[in-house]
Image: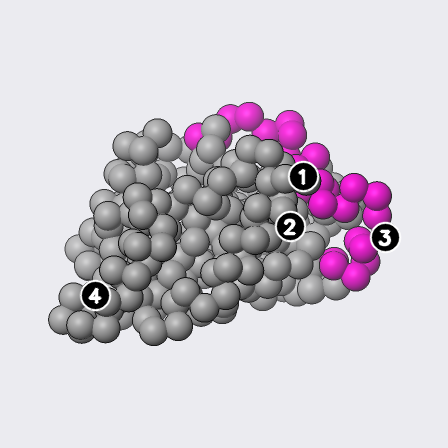
């Protein structure tokens, strides 16, 4: 079982889009996938067509020990999801005095065994929720837009992962960089990709996610890219990326 956290403290870089469509692509290729929405904005939950504000139990209740993990998993089109809600926005403050607060998610998921992949969609910050993801995951994927400011803030993120590795989770590694919103007609995009490759080397996936309007439209219909437009560039790119993820082992 591979547990992967999708992290970037910058908002709007494609974390949720990557988490959802990589999950859907892996499922399409026969893998059993669990998605976990750790963002108080609940974008992953809403993007899958689930009304987060109507749910009784979410990851918030799980972290507070108010329910068991099997009580909150929602299955939709072959994908299992632990949803989020706006209540999660208060979790950092509420849980700040709890002993072992960095390990709440890891402990809650210990009974889960029957998945090939667990994908964690993290909030755009490096607070307690992201820290819980880093203590739970073995791998970190960083979505990066192929734009001028892509590498801004990377040193802080890498430093955070290094500290977690040293103190809380010796198994955590940054193993994947996903280039998003790529347009090979733009020289700037190509130059940024060269910088990313120089910085991260072989950790940059060979598949780039091309700029594609269908990827932006699909969540408004509560659909993954494969449900919304299976023949789009977005669907082809994410399926190729999933093949690459599987082949990396």
Q: Earlier in the sequence, mark 4 or mark 2?
A: 2
Q: Earlier in the sequence, mark 1 or mark 3?
A: 3
Question: Where does residue 203 sit, x and y in percent of width and height?
Answer: 35, 45
* Residue stretch rendered in magenta on the structure: 91-116
Give the distance between the C-alpha atoms of the residues marked 4 and 2, in whole angstroms: 32 Å
Helix, strand or loop at mark 3? loop
Residue 131 badge: 2
Please indicate, yes or no, whether residue 52 appears anywhere in the rendered image.
no
Nearer mark to the viewer, of 1 and 3: 1
Question: Where does residue 72 sit, x and y in percent of width and height?
Answer: 63, 44
240 or 166, which is in the foreground? 166
Query: Residue, x 74% and y 58% (percent of image)?
Result: 91
For mark 3, what is the residue?
A: 97
Name the image quarter holding residue 123.
Answer: bottom right
Residue 190 badge: 4
Nearer mark to the viewer, of 4 and 3: 4
78 or 238, which is in the foreground? 238
């Amino acid at each position: 079982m591979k547990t992967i956290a999708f992290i970037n403290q910058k908002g709007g870089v494609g974390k949720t889009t990557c988490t959802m469509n990589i999950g859907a692509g892996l499922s399409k290729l026969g893998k059993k996938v669990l998605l976990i929405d750790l963002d108080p904005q609940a974008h992953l939950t809403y993007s899958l067509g689930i009304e987060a504000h109507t749910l009784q139990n979410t990851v918030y209740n799980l972290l507070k020990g108010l329910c068991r993990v099997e009580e909150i998993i929602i299955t939709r089109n072959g994908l299992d999801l632990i949803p989020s809600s706006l209540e999660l926005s208060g979790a950092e403050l509420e849980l700040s005095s709890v002993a072992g607060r960095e390990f709440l998610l890891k402990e809650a998921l210990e009974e889960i065994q029957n998945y090939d992949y667990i994908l964690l969609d993290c909030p755009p910050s490096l607070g307690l929720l992201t820290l819980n993801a880093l203590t739970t995951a073995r791998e970190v994927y960083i979505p990066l837009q192929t734009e001028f400011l892509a590498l801004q803030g990377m040193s802080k993120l890498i430093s955070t992962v290094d500290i977690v590795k040293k103190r809380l989770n010796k198994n955590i590694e940054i193993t994947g960089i996903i280039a998003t919103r790529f347009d090979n007609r733009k020289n700037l995009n190509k130059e940024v990709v060269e910088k990313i490759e120089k910085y991260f080397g072989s950790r940059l996936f060979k598949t780039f996610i091309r700029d594609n309007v269908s990827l932006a439209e699909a969540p408004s219909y509560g659909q993954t890219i494969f449900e919304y437009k299976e023949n789009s560039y977005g669907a082809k790119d994410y399926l190729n990326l999933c093949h690459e993820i599987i082949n990396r082992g």
